[in-house]
Image (cartoon, rainbow, N blue to C red):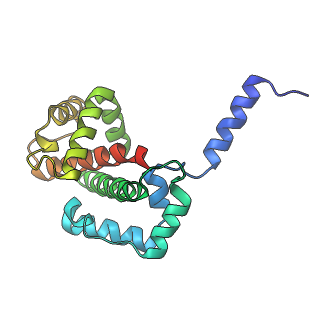
Amino acid sequence: MPLTRPLLACCALVALWGSPALAGEARCLWNSLAPATQDRLLATYAGAGAAGLVEVKLESAEARRQMKRCAELGGVVDPKRAVRAMGLALQGFVAQRGAARRLTALGAHSEQQLDLAWAELGPEKRAQLHLLAERRSEGRSADASVEASPSMDELIAILDRASLLSRADPGVQRELGAYVAGRSLQEAFEPRF
């Protein structure tokens, strides 16, 4: 009996839900780490912020596991750039995750609320933030600041309209800046590995 289109679509959805993260996703990189390493990365973020993540080095076995599981280097012209992109995407993922945890702990808002506000920004504003993240990661624009970008202002306005942000709390503002910088970095570099 041939499969009908709705049944095929349903099977495809079930297969996607049950499968691990696809290559080129920071979540795949994160899931390939040992729980102790995940805890160490989040503790580093909690102690030193996103800047502290730059100094963290993965064990070579974990890095190899990430490469094997998450990177498709067959068509990549420069594997070293792909490895760098993996590191930056993971750094952004950890910063985003750490900032979201802190924002939730501060009672500011949940990850779901942050995701909705991020989606409301739209692709053009997010692309501006991605470009800013790229420039910062390459050191081309030391004065480039996520916190001072028009897209950041719009995200704050979205969160403010939804009563999700206290503009008066510098801790919330700092974590929101880290969340946006991390998410921008992650999304800018995921397509590169």
Task: Name the spot of residue 54 as percent of width and height, x first.
Answer: 25, 64
| Residue 80 position (above or below residue 156) | below
Residue 107 vs residue 80, the one in the foreground: 80
Is 183 positioned to the left or the right of 135 in the image?
right
Which residue is the extreme one toward the top?
Answer: 5
Residue occupying the point 67% across, 43% down: 15
Displayed quadrant of residue 79: bottom left
Residue occupying the point 82% across, 28% down: 3
Residue occupying the point 74% across, 30% down: 8
Task: Name the spot of residue 16 as percent of width and height, x first.
Answer: 62, 42
The answer, for residue 34, to whether it is visible in the render is: no
Task: Name the spot of residue 64 as percent of width and height, x first.
Answer: 50, 69
| Residue 180 position (above or below residue 47) | above
Displayed quadrant of residue 147: top left
Residue 96 vs residue 140, the one in the foreground: 140
Which residue is the extreme one toward the right?
Answer: 1
| Residue 42 position (above or below residue 89) | below
Task: Name the spot of residue 46 as percent of width and height, x first.
Answer: 25, 65
Count of numbered circles on the image: 0
Looking at the rendered image, the quarter that the N terminus falls into is top right
Residue occupying the point 24% across, 33% down: 128
The answer, for residue 50, to whether it is visible in the render is: yes
Is 67 positioned to the left or the right of 114 in the image?
right
| Residue 157 position (above or below residue 132) | above
